[in-house]
Amino acid sequence: MMPSMMTITLNINKPPFNCVFSVNSAVGESLVTDFTFTVNGCIDIDLPLDYKFFIYKSYNDSLQEIINPINVLRTMMTDFTS
């Protein structure tokens, strides 16, 4: 068996920058108050941009995902307006 070597070049997409995230209701009650999430001003050469918003039950859950990426404790938010 002969030794072999292979090289692969991967192009990694950089995240957009200059983004401003806002929520239309600063306070409210879940399942009662309508919240609208908006992202504006993003600059990126790779268009169109696609957004997904996630929530964690606690700050410690978000830290756990950084420590152990296999243990994902977030939930993707879904648009129920239509």
Image: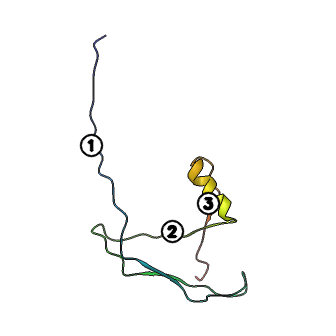
Query: Amino acid under label 2?
Result: Lys
Q: Position of residue 19 (x, y in %)?
A: 40, 77
Instruction: Locate the C terminus and report the quarter of the image it occupies.
Output: bottom right
Gap in angstroms between the C-alphas marked 1 and 2: 28 Å
Tell me the mark number nearer the camera, choosing from 2 and 3: 3
Among numbered discs 2 and 3, the one appearing first in the sequence: 2
Determine the secondary structure under disc 1: loop
Gap in angstroms between the C-alphas marked 2 and 3: 16 Å
Determine the secondary structure under disc 3: helix
The answer to whether marks 3 and 1 mark residues whose Cβ atoms lie closer than 8 Å is: no
For disc 1, the marked residue is: 9
Query: Amino acid under label 1?
Result: Thr
The mark total stands at: 3
Query: Amino acid under label 3?
Result: Ser
Which residue lies at the image location 73% right of the left edge and 84% below the top edge? 29
Among numbered discs 3 and 1, the one appearing first in the sequence: 1
Query: Where is 16 relative to 5, above or below?
Result: below
Query: Where is 21 relative to 7, above or below?
Result: below
Instruction: Locate the N terminus and report the quarter of the image it occupies.
Output: top left
Local crowd at mark 1 within 10 Å, few (<14), some, or many (≥20)?
Answer: few
For disc 2, the marked residue is: 52
Which residue lies at the image location 56% right of the left edge and 49% below the top edge? 69
For disc 3, the marked residue is: 62
Quadrant position of residue 34: bottom right
Q: How is the image coloured?
A: rainbow
Among numbered discs 1 and 2, the one appearing first in the sequence: 1
